[in-house]
Image: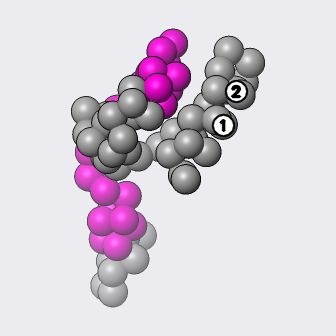
Amino acid sequence: EQRRDMLELLDDRYGQRSTLVTSQMPVDNWHELIGDPTLADAILDRLVHNAYRINLKGESMRKRTKKLTAPGASD
């Protein structure tokens, strides 16, 4: 099961290695997304404890790139 694999991976790395996670889903929704409450608690405890969180805001890079490459766009 993927949830147990994730927990095992995080447990092996906890306190020894860095783990980088990127998501478009807000952290507040992760518990529900993971599903199983017990595994979600364990996974999120390992991810969030001692974590550095960087929230990026702004226009989507896809939108910005599309504007730059649109026909008739100037350099």
Judge by depth and name the residue closer to the eye, 62 or 29: 29
Q: Which residues are magenta?
A: 42-67
When the figure is inspected, residue 66 is found, relative to residue 8, above or below; the finding is below
Residue closest to the far bottom: 71
Q: Is 43 covered by the magenta stretch?
A: yes
Could you say which quadrant of the image residue 4 lies in? top right
How many circles with numbers are drawn on the protein?
A: 2
Circle 1 residue: 9
User: What kind of element bears circle 2?
Assistant: helix
> Dot 2 surroundings within 10 Å: few (below 14), some, or many (20 or more)?
few
* Residue 26 percent coordinates (x, y): 28, 39
Could you say which quadrant of the image residue 71 lies in? bottom left
Mark identifier at residue 13: 2
Amino acid type, residue under disc 1 in the picture: Leu
* Residue 43 percent coordinates (x, y): 48, 31
Q: Are marks 1 and 2 in contact (CB under 8 Å)?
A: yes
Give the position of the C terminus as an image quadrant.
bottom left
> Dot 1 surroundings within 10 Å: few (below 14), some, or many (20 or more)?
few
* Residue 42 percent coordinates (x, y): 47, 26
Q: Residue at x 30, y 65 (%)?
A: 63
Could you say which quadrant of the image residue 12 lies in? top right
When the figure is inspected, residue 26 is found, relative to residue 61, above or below; the finding is above
**Can the viewer see residue 52 in this picture?**
no
State the separation of the CA atoms marked 1 and 2. 6 Å
Q: Residue at x 31, y 56 (%)?
A: 60
Q: Residue at x 52, y 39 (%)?
A: 21
**Can the viewer see residue 11 in this picture?**
yes
User: What kind of element bears circle 1?
Assistant: helix
Mark identifier at residue 65: none
**Image check: 6 left or right of 75?**
right
Amino acid type, residue under disc 2 in the picture: Arg
